[in-house]
Image (cartoon, rainbow, N blue to C red):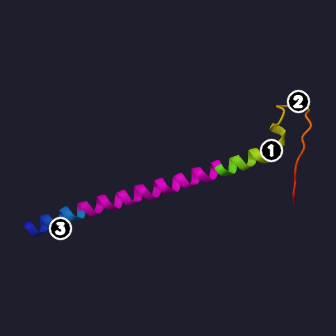
Amino acid sequence: MSKHHKQKKESKKAHRRQNARWLVTITSVLILLLAGWLWYESLEEDNDLTAIGQGENVVVQVHDPG
């Protein structure tokens, strides 16, 4: 009886560890996706010259070393 009880307890611990691993994995993936989205959005802002002047006609000088 003692052996069966001990196996059940270890199984519960293993299940908790597995759940913790899944939680860490899912959280890490979500953080990476959020960071990638923020990075992409910041690139779009840098390339969007219509945002300069807020609708008014302005002169824009673009330096393109390429």
Identify the amino acid type marked 2: Glu
Helix, strand or loop at mark 2: loop
Residue 42 at x, y = what percent? Answer: 70, 47
User: 59 or 34, which is in the foreground?
Assistant: 59
For image coordinates 55% across by 55% down, the residue present is: 32
Q: Which residue is mark 3?
A: 7
Q: Which residue is mark 2?
A: 56
Helix, strand or loop at mark 3: helix
Residue 30 at x, y = what percent? Answer: 52, 52
Residue 19 left/right relative to 48: left
Residue interval drawn in magenta: 12-38
Residue 38 left/right relative to 28: right
Q: Which residue is mark 1?
A: 48
Q: CA distance from mark 2 to mark 1?
A: 15 Å
Q: Is residue 31 visible?
A: yes
Q: CA distance from mark 2 to mark 3?
A: 73 Å
Rendering quarter of residue 64: bottom right
For marks 1 and 3, the one nearer the N-term is: 3
For image coordinates 41% across by 55% down, the residue present is: 23
